[in-house]
Amino acid sequence: MRVLVTGAEGFVAGPTIRALTNRGHEIVGTTRRNMAAAAEFILIPDIGPETDWSAALTGVKAIVHLAARVHITRETAANPLDAFRRVNRDGTARLVGAAIAAGVQTFAFVSTIGVVCQHSDIPVTETMPCAPATPYAISKFEAERAVLEASSRMRVVVLRPPMIYGSNAPGNFRPLVRAVRSGVPLPFGAVRNRRSFLFVGNLADALALAIDDSRAQGVYHVADDLGVSTPEFVTMIGDALGRRARFFSIPVSGLRLAARLTGTRQILNKLVESLPVDAGRFTRDVGWHPRLSMREAVRASLMSA
């Protein structure tokens, strides 16, 4: 089957393209810049409500939509919500419409667990009401609705991952690895949270299964497991590096105060707050299980770094 993967230069795309290719699919990818590679790539420099997807959809029967405007560390847009909506909501809606017109049969969309909540003390399930709290999460939630509204015209699957890690992962993973590798002690000794993560290879497998298994329909949460504390996750990184992770204890209230003063509150929240994710529905519907445990996945991430 010919499968379109949008955002083919991104962090998730490489493992996803490999997983789909291993299942015998023919891949066409879209990128924002020219790429020299063996696979077929089509240049789509701008994603929004006017994007012309026709060249990318020739002969395509399934789509994995990864392209998105993601978290911006130093935001420059005058209206961040409008900027996120243009790419994530309006660009997705435009692709959905083009896919229907082109006769695409399956549409898989990667959203975020943040459309439900930013933190939770209980496992987050698909039945919980959505309360997106950031411009990124709001735009992804609205994009989900555009995808799900097309469910009568094609099979649609929405996956909501928590923080994704792996070799060259954006976000907090690389700074944590650098800190452990350098021996710098981290101030998380008093943190007792429970947070889920997802290895990029496990997400790629989930996306390939979503494309292949017709039982997959609707919204699913995906995660390695129900979660570990931040010190436990950092300790796994240390074990994989052959280095002892070092901690000292600062009360979480003190960490929050420091984060407010330094403008790093959103980064800190992901390190001290709980967000366990229940992936049971996807397991029950299609039999998905993470191919690698978290400990195995952390080791694999660092071996290929």
Image: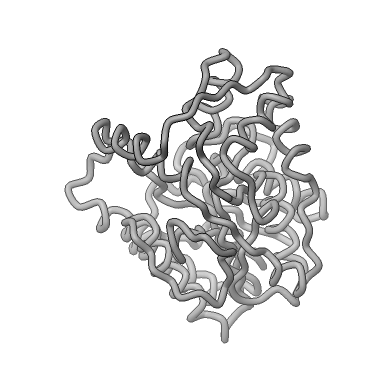
Query: Which residue is pictured at 48% across the width and 45% down the height?
Result: 43
Q: Is residue 119 left or right of residue 218?
A: left
- For the view shown, which residue lies furthest in the left direction? 78
Residue 44 image offset from top left, x and y in percent: 45, 49
For the residue pair 181 and 58, the one nearer the viewer reads as 181
For the residue pair 164 and 268, the one nearer the viewer reads as 268
Above or below, 167 against 90 in this view is: above
Q: Quadrant of residue 64?
A: bottom right
- Residue 242 visible to the viewer: yes
Above or below, 241 against 29 in this view is: above
Query: Which residue is pictured at 69% across the width and 17% down the height?
Result: 243
Q: Is residue 139 left or right of residue 243?
A: left
Q: Is residue 37 left or right of residue 89?
A: right
Quarter of the figure with the C terminus: top right
Q: Quadrant of residue 146?
A: bottom left
Query: Which residue is pictured at 77% across the width and 49% down the height?
Result: 21
For the residue pair 107 and 127, the one nearer the viewer reads as 127
